[in-house]
Image (spheres, rainbow, N blue to C red):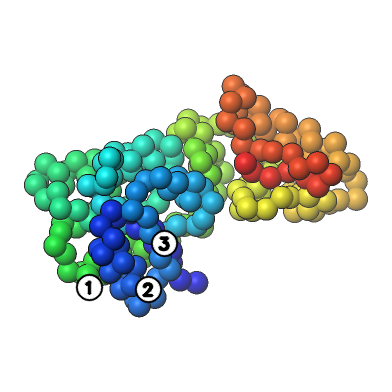
Amino acid sequence: MAKSIFIIEDEKDVLELLEYTLQKAGFDTNGATSLKHVEQFLDEEKVDLMIVDRNLQGAEGSEFVAELRKKGVDIPVIFVTAKDKDGDIEEGFLRGGDDYVTKPFNINELILRIKAILARTSKNEEKILVYKDIKMELDTRRVYVENKEVELTRLEFDLLKAFIENKHNVLQRDYLLEHVWKDESFFQDKTVNVAINRLKKKIDPEKNKHYFKSVWGVGYSLC
């Protein structure tokens, strides 16, 4: 499957050049000229790498990336920008950048940098799941909300994992009983309801994040 790259660049001609060239190199691309709706897109779609300009209209790209990092979003980022002073480059890395390319740039060199980062990160991409400010480490079975560890039981961990892996779908109770409990013959609907309520209390004790929504007569989904 082709890797997905999301480009944030307010110069339309540069954005179009990047999209066209990266598509020819075998990548799936999406682009935006502003930060509007970007977080929503990242919540809804799988993105393997972001290319971000720092000089955006009414916004600073590296500050946006720093906010994403605080929320637990760990998508690799390459800054492609005209900010080329030593202090600018250091600032870009400190704010969460994985690489830094200054304009004007060589597109072939950029593609090599993209491939190098994807080669490093793809080894771990199946070991970590991220949804909003939740991060799940599958190897260690640890869960973090806003970078603070939350202790879950085996069942609660597997339940949360099932939802994040199917974050665009409504999961029926029968599906959860079969794939999380591994047996749908013994348990009842209320078994799922009780488990989800326990999970919600642990990952959202203040009841202000609203990760889940109930779809009447069908099941549950992530918001």
8 or 195: nearer the viewer: 8
Q: Position of residue 97 (x, y in %)?
A: 28, 48
Mark-to-mark CA distance, 1 and 3: 19 Å
Q: Amino acid at mark 1?
A: Asn
Q: Tag 3, which secondary structure?
A: strand
Rendered view: 57 above or below 17 = above
Q: Which residue is mark 1?
A: 108
Q: Which residue is mark 3?
A: 30
Residue 212 appearing in the image: yes
- Name the residue rendered at 62%, 32% in the picture: 210
Q: Residues within 10 Å of mark 2 (few under 14, many from 20)?
A: some
Q: Which residue is mark 2?
A: 23
Find out whether the residues at labels 1 and 2 contact each other: C-beta distance under 8 Å: no
Quadrant showing the C terminus = top right
Q: Amino acid at mark 3?
A: Asn
Tell me which label, 1 or 3, sits earlier in the chain: 3
Instruction: Give the quadrant of residue 25.
Output: bottom left
Residue 50 appearing in the image: no
Q: Amino acid at mark 2?
A: Gln
Mark-to-mark CA distance, 1 and 2: 13 Å
- Name the residue rendered at 42%, 48% in the picture: 38
